[in-house]
């Protein structure tokens, strides 16, 4: 009879996990504690339109349902089905950027595309320039692959536009890529062409790849924002978008990436495809909705943009009325990045947790997006109805933080 070991040891975790943080979801653990204590929580932490009554267009649902009924439930090509890649390429071409379907990959949301690209082009110990504040997936992925995020400043006193001098100062021989999120999450900023051209020029001067996160390109309140690559189609730009936001299907995890036509990006494209082979494919049936989305009716976007503008204006007006708080008017997407004047010795996380425990309102502290904790920034998702937002902002105004 073999002996059974009774030794109990804790299985250690990889050190990379200690570097990994994703504040948008991590803070939900605190919200669950507040709910367990009997307080209703208003979740303004995650940008999921479906949770606030904005529903996926029926023709996209029908496309996925039909694909399932027709038996398209197996693995697809690693890069995605041909029809979807062709639809993405045609949509980029319609927007002014000639794109070959062979340089398009269908991914599990933009998130997977970002991870594939960073893993393909950045080695351990190298740097990637990310905006501050930033979408925290970038810093989380860089932590996983052992690379370093280097923050460049965006200026809330100048419409949250990038500080170009901050970018130039941050570049070293270890810098590999420049992340540009436009329209921006978490600030709602949209960059003018002058700024975009300057970013391209900096990347060209220093041999950097631009990761152009354009998920919210269809959700600017004044209409579609052209892809960054339209300004220089031979620049080393990798562009991203998805069905998650503008097509109201975040849970489907259907996104795409287009690698620019420059031959300089050919090795990156080959490396990305090699990595994509290793994960087999993105969800198959949902890929059939990409063609339906990009070639079909988009009238829901007109309605969605109008609704977002109303909420953005309400949010900006109401938050700017709160003593000690200021908020820059967003120009796209459904986020705002207010700034709260903090008492000495307190942080943005102190404010956010205090607000949650006192009122049940869950927002995300700015340091989770790369801002200084003492600066007092936090992100609000304003997808709730105007009436509910009014109630939320009343509660925020009544909260006394000390």
Image: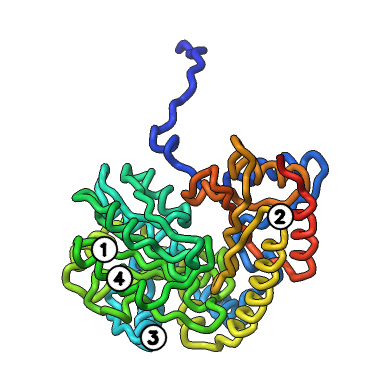
Judging by the rendered image, the residue that carries numbered circle 3 is 95
Instruction: Using the image, determine if residue 47 lies above or below residue 342.
Output: below
Image coordinates for residue 255, horizontal then vertical, percent: 45, 68
Please name the residue shown 80% across and 39% down the image.
37
Are circles 2 and 3 on residues that touch, CB within 8 Å?
no
Residue 401 placed where, x, y %? 72, 43
Sequence-earlier tag: 4 or 1: 4
Do callouts 3 and 1 mark residues in contact (Cβ within 8 Å)?
no
Which quarter of the image is occupied by the C terminus? top right
Kindly report the distance in space between the C-alpha atoms of the residues bearing marks 4 and 3.
21 Å
2 or 4: mark nearer the eye: 2
SS label for mark 1: strand
Whichever of callouts 3 and 1 sits on the residue coming sooner in the sequence is: 3
Q: CA distance from mark 2 to mark 3?
A: 43 Å
Q: Which residue is mark 2?
A: 323
**Circle nearer the viewer, 4 or 1:** 4
Q: Which one is in front in this view, the residue at disc 2 or the one at disc 3?
A: 2
Q: Earlier in the sequence, mark 2 or mark 3?
A: 3
User: Quick check: 391 left or right of 340?
Assistant: right
Which residue: 46% across, 25% down? 11
Spatial distance from mark 1 to mark 2, Cα to Cα? 42 Å
Provide the residue designation for mark 4. Answer: 198
User: The residue tagged with tag 2: helix, strand or loop?
Assistant: loop
Q: Residues within 10 Å of mark 1 (few under 14, many from 20)?
A: many
Per the image, label 4 sits on a secondary structure element best described as: helix
Instruction: Residue 25: give x, y in percent of width and height.
Output: 58, 49
């Amino acid at each position: 009879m073999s002996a059974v070991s009774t030794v109990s040891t804790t299985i250690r975790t990889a050190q990379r996990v200690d570097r990994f943080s994703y504040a948008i979801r991590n803070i939900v653990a605190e919200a669950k504690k507040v709910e367990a204590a009997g307080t209703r929580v208003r979740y303004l932490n995650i940008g999921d339109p479906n949770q606030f009554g904005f529903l996926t267009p029926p023709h996209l649902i029908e496309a996925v349902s039909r694909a399932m009924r027709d038996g398209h439930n197996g693995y697809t090509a690693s890069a995605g089905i041909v029809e979807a890649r062709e639809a993405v390429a045609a949509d980029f071409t319609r927007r002014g950027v000639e794109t070959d379907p062979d340089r398009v990959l269908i991914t599990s949301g933009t998130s997977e595309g970002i991870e594939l690209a960073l893993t393909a082009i950045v080695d351990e110990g190298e740097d990637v320039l990310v905006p501050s504040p930033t979408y925290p997936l970038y810093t989380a992925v860089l932590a996983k692959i052992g690379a370093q995020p280097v923050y460049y400043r965006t200026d809330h006193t100048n419409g949250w536009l990038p500080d170009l001098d901050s970018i130039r100062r941050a570049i070293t021989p270890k810098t590999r890529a420049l992340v540009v999120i436009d329209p921006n999450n978490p600030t709602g900023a949209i960059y003018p062409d002058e700024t975009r051209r300057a970013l391209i020029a900096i990347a060209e001067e220093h041999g950097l790849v631009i990761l152009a996160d354009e998920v919210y390109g269809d959700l600017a309140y004044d209409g579609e924002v052209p892809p960054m690559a339209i300004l220089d189609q031979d620049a080393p730009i990798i562009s991203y978008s998805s069905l998650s936001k503008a097509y109201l299907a975040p849970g489907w995890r259907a996104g795409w990436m287009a690698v620019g036509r420059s031959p300089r990006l050919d090795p990156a494209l080959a490396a990305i495809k090699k990595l994509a082979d290793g994960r087999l494919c993105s969800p198959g049936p949902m890929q059939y909705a990409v063609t339906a989305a990009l070639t079909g009716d988009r009238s829901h976007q007109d309605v969605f943009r109008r609704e977002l503008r109303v909420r953005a204006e309400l949010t900006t007006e109401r938050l700017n009325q709160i003593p000690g708080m200021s908020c820059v008017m967003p120009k796209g997407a459904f986020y705002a990045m207010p700034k709260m004047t903090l008492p000495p010795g307190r942080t943005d996380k102190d404010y956010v947790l205090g607000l949650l425990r006192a009122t049940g309102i869950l927002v995300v502290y700015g340091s989770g997006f790369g801002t200084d904790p003492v600066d007092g920034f936090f992100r609000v998702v304003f997808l709730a109805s105007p009436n509910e937002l009014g109630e939320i902002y009343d509660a925020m105004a009544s909260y006394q933080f000390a």
